[in-house]
Amino acid sequence: MTPSRPTVMRRLLALLGPYRGWMLGGAALALLAAVAAIGLMAVSGGFIAAMALAGASGAAIDYYTPAAAIRAFAILRSGGRRGSRPCAAASCSRACGPMSMRSSMPTSRCWCRSRWHCSAWSAC
């Protein structure tokens, strides 16, 4: 007999509970990347349209401010993506670490014979 869906979700949330901070950090950085991508599209679209209108009418336009906003949104988007993936991966690795085969291995020596990559939650 398979357990019901709410029971499975409760067990999963209980397993991931100690790593809630890592998961929330990854979700916050992913949200930052999404909002920055929307802002980047809005500012760059408006900037292109304003430059087209200025070029057609011969009017002068300030292009320093929109260019700075485009750079800021691009940096925020890249930073959010760069940070959200390791955060989410760390939470999954820490939650699934006790269930791996390495946790049942002897702890005297690391499987790769170098300890630089081993973290506090792994068995080596």
Image (tube, grey):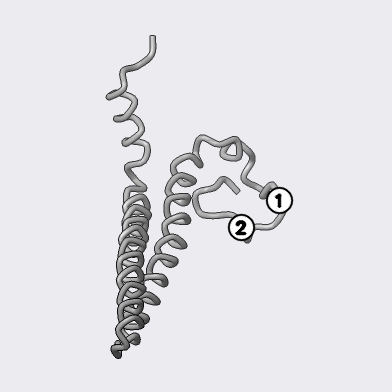
At horizontal 46% and vertical 46% (from top left) the residue drawn is: 94
* Badge 2 vs badge 1, beta-carbon distance below 8 Å: yes
Which quarter shows the N terminus?
top left
Element type at marker 1?
Answer: loop
- 72, above or below 20, in the image: below
* Residue 117's disc number: 2
At horizontal 31% and vertical 29% (from top left) the residue drawn is: 9
Horizontally, residue 103 falls left or right of residue 50, namely right
Give the distance between the C-alpha atoms of the residues marked 2 and 1, in whole angstroms.
9 Å
Q: Is residue 123 in view? A: yes
Q: Residues within 10 Å of mark 1 (few under 14, many from 20)?
A: few
Q: Position of residue 104 (x, y in %)?
A: 59, 35
Q: Which residue is mark 1?
A: 112
Q: Position of residue 10 (x, y in %)?
A: 29, 30
Q: Of residues 97 and 9, which is closer to you in this image?
A: 9
Count of numbered tags: 2
Q: Quadrant of residue 78?
A: bottom left
* Farthest front residue in view: 57
Q: Of residues 109 and 69, which is closer to you in this image?
A: 69
At horizontal 68% and vertical 49% (from top left) the residue drawn is: 109
* Farthest bottom residue in view: 60
At horizontal 49% and vertical 46% (from top left) the residue drawn is: 93
* Residue 102's disc number: none
- 92, above or below 56, in the image: above
Amino acid type at mark 1: Cys
